[in-house]
Amino acid sequence: MAIRFTIAKRAATPAEDGDIRLQPRLNNYPTVNVVDFQNSGFRLNSSLSAGELVHALYDLQSVMLHEMEKGNAVNLPGIGTFRLAIKGEIEVKNDCYHGRDVHASGINFQPDRELLSKIRQFKIEQVPYGLAFDTEEADIDQRLTNLFAQNDTVTHKDVRFAFEWTLTPHRVSSLLQRLVREGRLIREGSGSQTRYRAAAGHFGK
């Protein structure tokens, strides 16, 4: 089964004379919990149960934290190498360099060569799935008018469904934020409880 992608705009550099460049972007796929594979048809080749695998992974996390806290890199055979990433500022005092607010900011990951080689052999569909930008305003108005004809308030997921899943989650978020700024939608709630209501005079309301 081939992997699908959408189209994204890449910011132009001065050397590109302001032209907009298009680039492929991975379509929105779910995050898979590797432990769940122990309970599915594609089972990891291991005698460990799902519970035992969870404990083993947390033991591995403890070892990684112990070593990375000392500044060491950690290599997982067949997976890759994990290194601590740090950020901060450097200032000069009395002709000496000093760090200011230097802190651990994340993890840098370098995949195993064999793993990377196999990933590069993945088949990618050469036809993009949906569009990540440039939706016609008339189409937006019509789809949202139809949506609000059946609902007083809608969610992010409702809007994606209204566009038949042809817009990425990021594109839907950008669209909703723009419509709120323009006063065409009213945002209610926050986080996972966020809903949107059509402002008076818009989308059939």
Image: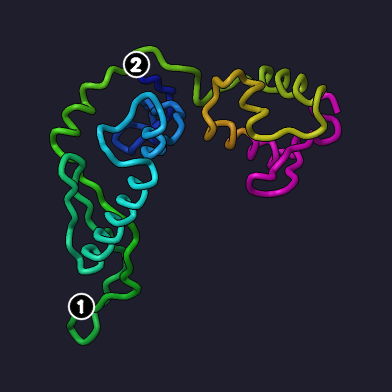
Instruction: Determine if residue 22 is in view.
Output: no
- Is 204 magenta? The answer is yes
Give the residue at x 22% y 56%. 83
Please determine whether, in this image, residue 202 is positioned above or below residue 95: above
Asked if the residues shown at circle 1 and circle 2 are in contact, with their CB atoms under 8 angstroms apart, the answer is: no
* Viewer-side residue, 136 vs 25: 25
Give the residue at x 35% y 73%. 101
Q: Which amino acid does label 2 sit on?
A: Ala
Answer with the quarter of the image where residue 25 lies.
Answer: top left
* Viewer-side residue, 85 vs 48: 48
Quadrant containing the N terminus is: top left
> Distance between the Cα atoms at labels 1 and 2?
52 Å
Q: Residues within 10 Å of mark 1 (few under 14, many from 20)?
A: few
Q: Where is residue 181 in the image (x, y as percent from the top left)?
A: 68, 42
* Viewer-side residue, 31 vs 17: 31
Q: How crowded is mark 2: few (under 14 residues within 10 Å), some or many (20 or more)?
A: few
Give the residue at x 81% y 36%. 199
Sequence-wise, which precedes: disc 1 or disc 2? 2
Which mark lies nearer to you, 1 or 2?
2
Q: Position of residue 33 (x, y in %)?
A: 41, 38
How many numbered marks are there?
2
- Is 177 magenta? The answer is yes
Q: Position of residue 79 (x, y in %)?
A: 21, 41
Q: Where is residue 34 in the image (x, y as percent from the top left)?
A: 36, 38
Q: Give the range drawn in magenta.
A: 176-205
Q: In the rendered image, which residue does mark 2 sit on?
A: 2
Q: In the rendered image, which residue does mark 1 sit on?
A: 97
- Left or right for 48, reference 9: left
Figure colour scheme: rainbow
Instruction: Determine if residue 129 is in view.
Output: yes
Q: What residue type is labelled 1?
A: Tyr
Mark 1, secondary structure of its residue: strand
